Amino acid sequence: MLSTPRLANDITGRIITPDDADYDDARRVFMGTIDRRPAMIVRAADAADVSRVITLARETGTELAVRSGGHSPAGHSASEGGIVLDLSALRGLEIDASSRTAWAETGLTAGEYSTAAGAHGLATGFGDAGTVGVGGITLSGGIGFLVRKHGMTIDDLLAAEVATADGRLLRVDAEHHPDLFWAIRGGGGNFGVATRLKFRLHEVDTIVGGMLFLPASADVLAAFIAEAEAAPEELSTIANVMPAPPLPFLAPEHHGRLVVMAMLVYAGDLEAGERAIAPFRALATPVADMVRPMPYPEMYPPGDENYRPVAVTRTLFTDSVELPTAESILSWLERSTAPMAAAQLRVLGGAMARIPAEATAFAHRDRHILANVVAMYAQPEDRAEHEAWVTGLASELSQGDPAGYAGFLGDEGEARVRAAYPGRTWERLAEVKVAYDPENLFRLNQNVPPAAG
């Protein structure tokens, strides 16, 4: 049985239980669809606390959820009746600008890390949201604003400190526990709790970037993707096809009409960046153009702490978005009855694609486009309708290919997890799981069970 007094004597951090006034705030996660009540939340103060909580969960057989930023689409950073190991107090950051490396504790957010590194004109690529925890996004892969120029987050991971299921605290890198180092680069939280991560930093100071809103037509969307694929590797793009929200800088006549809300980052020479972005501006008269030279951290504006989306999502890979596909995306969006529906398209390639597929646990290096489909809703009874819509559009885009990015997977079953880790990747992960977590203590994740036998 769980013993709060016993644990309280063993750890430096704080234990939060249902009797505490801030319990509801502490158990809240990003996704508004998740409403779980753990028996306790342990806000660890250091790696020793992490190890002791792992030991308690193992010895008592209690479900263990690990929370970095709390953004898991599947709700894996929350538990019903178990322990939530909250890493949010682990916020140490040591930047060595001369060696272009940084040690970051895993309670930091991507925005906090990027702001601190940006003060030195340096950056590590994470995703497209500043509020995600660096622990969660790194272990799942990390596909964001620098993916074509510098690769995924895991491609800049040089070492990690990991607490394993037996309570050990391990230093993990290419020379120490190389099997575990391979597995945590894309294999998620299956193998332990990362408490510190060592990253490579790149020179990324002033970029040409920001949001570009274009009217959504099939011609514009197909041409946007073609331009993104042909662009220099310094340019990474994320195109969100969606009804224009009522933002103050958008004219009222555009509100609710379909637009391509693109987020662009050119990490290189500023004049070359302006030239690279010119073809996108020429696709149609922009609804709004906020692309400009800016410090890279400005791509991560402060998030709304009260924003908790209630949504159905699907992630997939697709190899092209030509005119017929673009027409279909717009047709599906026009038919959606959701308060907000969107299709997001991230053109890949570049540095990410040059890493061999077997080098890390992310095996989809050759995929051209990462797509996400989302429908937000307000009433629980509406979920089935919007889920059918999301499934329909996602199925059409994927054309029967079940593969997806583990970092964006929801709670979709083992088949989808297997598709995220195809073939030999799954087998290798299961073998590493046997070595470091044979009892599957770390199972609240996109789970790879230990290999049989």
Image (cartoon, grey):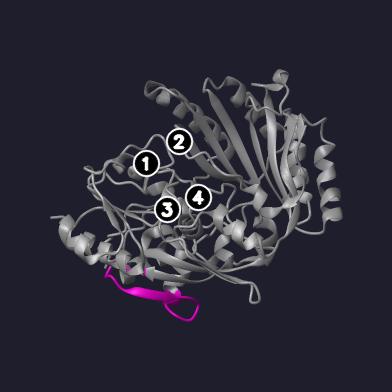
Residue 300's tag is none
Q: What percent of the width, then of the height, locates residue 77?
A: 37, 49
Pointers 2 and 4 in contact (CB under 8 A)? no
Q: State which tag comes first along the sequence, 2 or 4.
A: 4
Q: Tags 3 and 4 in contact by the CB under 8 Å rule?
A: no
Which residue corresponds to mark 3? 418
Q: Report if the CB atoms under discs 1 and 2 are less than 8 Å apart.
A: yes
Query: Could you give the CA–CA distance between mark 2 and mark 4, rounded to whole angstroms?
Result: 13 Å
**What segment is highlighted magenta in the picture?**
163-178
Q: Residues within 10 Å of mark 1 (few under 14, many from 20)?
A: some
Residue bearing the label numbered 1: 28
Report if the CB atoms under discs 4 and 1 are less than 8 Å apart.
no
Q: Residue at x 49, y 64 (%)?
A: 185
Is 439 situated left or right of 132 in this image? Answer: left
Q: CA distance from mark 1 to mark 2?
A: 9 Å
Residue at image position (59%, 25%) is 332
What residue type is disc 1 on?
Arg
The residue type indicated by label 3 comes to Arg
Check disc 2 and report its element: helix, strand or loop. Answer: loop
Q: Is residue 309 above or below residue 43?
A: above
Q: Earlier in the sequence, mark 3 or mark 4?
A: 4
Q: Position of residue 298 (x, y in %)?
A: 66, 49
Secondary element at image label 3: helix
Rounded to the nearest whole Å, what is the CA distance between mark 3 and mark 2?
29 Å
The residue tagged 4 is: 132
* Quarter of the image where the C terminus is located: bottom left
Q: Is residue 172 magenta?
A: yes
Q: Are marks 3 and 2 in contact (CB under 8 Å)?
A: no
Residue 209 appearing in the image: yes
Q: Main secondary structure of the magenta part?
A: loop
